[in-house]
Image (cartoon, helix red, strand yellow):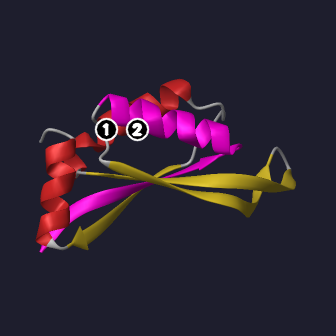
Amino acid sequence: MNNFILVYITNPTKEEAKKIAKHLLNKKLIACANIYSNINSLYHWKGKIADEKEFILIAKTTEKKYEKVKKEVEKIHSYTIPCIIKIPVSSNEKYFDWIRSEIKE
C-alpha cells in the first residue's frame, strides 16, 4: 500500500484556490490539485453562524511535505484562520510513484 496525503483547503474564491495551487506546484510541494467549485459552508464566526460560498482545493502530496505546504498556505491565504486539513490516503503504486517524482522526493 502506498500512502500519501490530501491537503484540504477552503478558499473564498476560485481565483484564490488557483493562486494557492499554482504557488504550491511551482515550489514542487504538491503534485496535483483539484478545485471543487461553489460549495456552501456554514460555521460559527464571531458569535454568529456564517453561511458562505467557498471553493475547496485538494492538494496531493506526501507526509514529508505537509509542514512546508501548511506554512506556504498560511503565508498567502486571505483568511485570518485558513482551513488546512491533512487527510491520509492510499493509492495504486504507479500513481504514488508519480506523486513522489513530481515533488522530487
Is 52 magenta? The answer is: no
User: The N terminus is located in which quarter?
Assistant: bottom left
Q: Which mark is residue 87?
A: none
Quadrant (top left/top right/bottom left/bottom right) for the C terminus: top left
At x 40% / y 38%, what residue is drawn?
Answer: 70
42 shown above or below 74: below
| Residue at image mark 1 | 67
Marker disc for residue 70: 2
Q: Give, as a single range, the part of the protein colored magenta.
A: 1-27
Q: Are marks 1 and 2 in contact (CB under 8 Å)?
A: yes
Residue 53 percent coordinates (x, y):
78, 55
Q: Is residue 99 left or right of residue 33?
A: left
Left or right, 75 with respect to 4, comes to: right
Residue at horizontal 23 percent and vertical 51 percent from the top: 62
Residue 75 in the image: x percent, y percent?
50, 24
Residue projecting furthest to the top:
75
Task: Judge by depth and name the residue closer to the eye, 14 or 67.
Answer: 14
Query: Magenta span has 26?
Result: yes
Q: Is residue 97 left or right of residue 21?
A: left
Outermost residue, right direction? 48
